[in-house]
């Protein structure tokens, strides 16, 4: 691992997005467990990132939550671990067409975080920010669901570095790129701010059952 931005990987994904531009699936929402265009994998859990896997120092890590909220808060690692812990078993869908069933996570539910930071009525979007420079945008309404998690455990162990330690955002009903790895910031905003992949040809929403892969 060089810990440098993987320019070739990024360029390849941009080229794919450009190729499929305006060719998004427009059918009805599938009721199946496996979204259209996906295939299942079993034991493997592929690692996809920008080529940078930041180190984690529990004495220095911070999660900064700010913007359209009544109580902007900076959580230290110890602060974060004191928040109510919840488990989640959910299917995981990657935009590169693989899905993994019944992935076990644990961490802090997004709705429990909301009890602390108290979003304003003007909060319509949440921009997730990561220690590797990655960002992704989500509708606030997509995150205030009971199964959205700020996860710090994977398979009953701390999330390993390659899977986005120490915290990653898990949004089971969207493609996985919408859940940032190496999470260190959440900005609540009144206006949308498309993130890293969204500005490079990826769909602004990312619903797997509607195949919202590209713009």
Image (tube, rainbow, N blue to C red):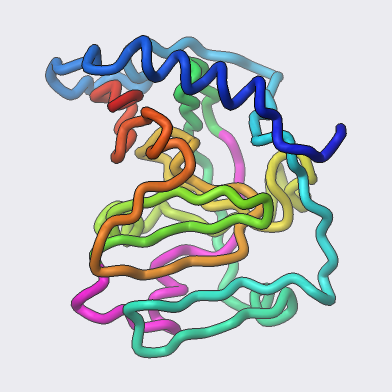
In the rendered view, tell whether residue 129 sits above or below residue 51.
below
In the rendered view, tell whether residue 185 sits above or below residue 65.
above
Q: Is residue 185 left or right of residue 112?
A: right
Q: Is residue 114 magenta?
A: yes
Residue projecting furthest to the bottom? 71
The spot of residue 207 in percent (x, y) is 30, 33
In the rendered view, tell whether residue 119 sits above or below residue 166.
below
Given residues 138 and 190, the one toward you in this image is 190
The quadrant of the image that shows the N terminus is top right
The spot of residue 110 in percent (x, y) is 44, 64
Given residues 81 and 117, the one toward you in this image is 117
Residue shown at 59% from the left, 14% from the top: 41
The spot of residue 171 in percent (x, y) is 43, 46
Given residues 204 and 152, the one toward you in this image is 204
Residue shown at 73% from the left, 52% from the top: 165
The quadrant of the image that shows the C terminus is top left
Question: How many numbered marks does the figure carry?
Answer: 0
Q: Is residue 71 left or right of residue 13?
A: left
The spot of residue 132 in percent (x, y) is 67, 50
Residue shown at 73% from the left, 34% from the top: 51
Q: Is residue 23 left or right of residue 60?
A: left
User: Where, by quadrant of the figure, is residue 104 drawn?
Assistant: top right
Q: Is residue 18 magenta?
A: no
User: Where, by quadrant of the figure, is residue 108 drawn?
Assistant: bottom right
Q: In the image, which residues are magenta?
A: 103-123
């Amino acid at each position: 691992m060089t810990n440098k931005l993987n320019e070739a990987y990024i360029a390849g994904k941009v080229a794919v997005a450009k190729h499929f531009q305006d060719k998004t699936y427009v059918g009805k929402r599938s009721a199946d467990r496996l979204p259209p265009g996906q295939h299942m994998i079993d034991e493997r859990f592929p690692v996809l990132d920008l080529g940078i896997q930041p180190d984690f120092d529990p004495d220095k890590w911070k999660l900064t939550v700010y913007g359209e909220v009544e109580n902007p808060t900076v959580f230290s690692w110890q602060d974060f671990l004191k928040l109510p812990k919840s488990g989640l078993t959910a299917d995981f869908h990657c935009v590169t067409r693989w899905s993994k069933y019944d992935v076990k996570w644990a961490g802090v539910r997004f709705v429990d975080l909301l009890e602390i930071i108290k979003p304003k009525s003007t909060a319509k979007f949440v921009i997730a920010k990561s220690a590797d420079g990655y960002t992704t945008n989500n509708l606030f309404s997509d995150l205030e669901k009971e199964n959205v998690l700020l996860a710090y455990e994977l398979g009953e162990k701390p999330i390993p570095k390659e899977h986005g330690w120490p915290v990653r955002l898990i949004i089971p009903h969207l493609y996985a790129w919408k859940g940032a790895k190496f999470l260190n910031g959440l900005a609540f905003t009144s206006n949308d701010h498309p993130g890293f992949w969204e500005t490079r040809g990826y769909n602004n929403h990312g619903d797997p059952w509607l195949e919202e892969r590209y713009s």
